Amino acid sequence: MAEEDLKGTVIVYSIVGCTKCDAAKQHLSKLRIPYADISLDSFPQCRDEMERLCGSTDVPQIFFNDVHVGDDEGLNALVS
């Protein structure tokens, strides 16, 4: 996906089987907020990019318009 295609989009870096990742994506869906899911299982090369952007290898990591929202707790704080 081209970088310009992601402007104005929530981006969630996740891995398969991560309950916090699933909860964050379900929360976004419940709020009808569209998001792009970047699965680090499918796109392992994106892990380095994620770590460079946020300084962490933990998932989920959530961004909006290139601004790091944080993990699932950061998302919950933002939308509550």
Image (cartoon, helix red, strand yellow):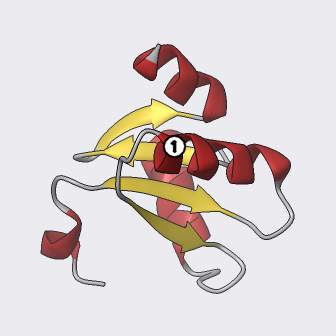
Q: Residue at x 57, y 40 (%)?
A: 27
Q: Residue at x 59, y 83 (%)?
A: 43
Quarter of the picture containing the N terminus is bottom left
38 to 80, vertically: above or below: below
Q: Disc 1 residue type?
A: Lys
Between 23 and 45, which is closer to the camera in this rendering? 23
Q: Residue at x 86, y 64 (%)?
A: 17
Q: Position of residue 66 (x, y in %)?
A: 27, 47
In this view of the protein, can residue 23 be seen by the observer?
Answer: yes
Q: Position of residue 69 (x, y in %)?
A: 43, 32
49 to 69, vertically: above or below: below
Describe residue 73's horizontal placement relative to residue 2 as left or right.
right
In this view of the protein, can residue 58 be seen by the observer?
Answer: no
* Residue corresponding to mark 1: 30
29 to 70, vertically: above or below: below
Q: Residue at x 61, y 49 (%)?
A: 26
Q: Position of residue 49 (x, y in %)?
A: 47, 64
Between 64 and 50, which is closer to the camera in this rendering? 64
Please identify the quarter of the rendering in which residue 16 is found.
bottom right
Please identify the quarter of the rendering in which residue 78 is found.
top left
Q: Secondary structure at mark 1?
A: helix
Q: Position of residue 55 (x, y in %)?
A: 56, 41
